[in-house]
Image: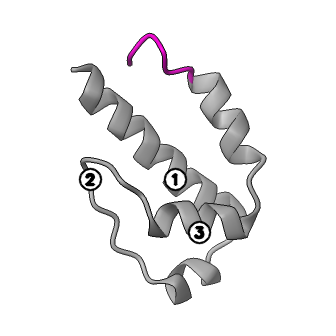
Amino acid sequence: MSADFSFENMCSKITSMSKREVIRRLLHFDGPIKLDFTREYLEKLSTERLRHILLAAVVVTHRKHAS
């Protein structure tokens, strides 16, 4: 991971996000991996599950950029 990426800070930010904010971030995720979710599907998931998906996408993005 890059030096400017703090896993702890990213986890803290994501865990403090509301369900609405996490859904917004997932629907508009701009990274090397494309996320293809509908709002309807995401709204059915728990907030914790959504946070897990977002965190995984962010970690993968930063690993690709650090390589």
Q: What amino acid is found at the position of numbered circle 2 in the picture?
A: Ile
Q: Main secondary structure of the magenta part?
A: loop
Magenta residues (range): 1-6
Q: Measure how far apart labels 2 and 1 are at the Cα level.
A: 12 Å
Residue occupying the point 54% across, 60% down: 25
Q: Quadrant of the C terminus?
A: top left
Q: Residues within 10 Å of mark 1 (few under 14, many from 20)?
A: many
| In the displayed structure image, the side of residue 66 where residue 18 appears, left or right | right
Residue occupying the point 44% across, 83% down: 38
Q: Quadrant of the N terminus?
A: top left
Q: What amino acid is found at the position of numbered circle 1 in the picture?
A: Leu
Q: Earlier in the sequence, mark 2 or mark 1?
A: 2
Q: Position of residue 12 (x, y in %)?
A: 72, 35
Residue situated furthest left in the rendering: 67
44 vs 16, nearest the viewer: 16
- Identify the colour scheme used: one colour
Disc 3 to disc 1: CB gap under 8 Å: no
Residue 54 badge: 1
Say which quarter of the image contains residue 64: top left
Circle 3 is placed at which residue position? 23
38 vs 48, nearest the viewer: 38
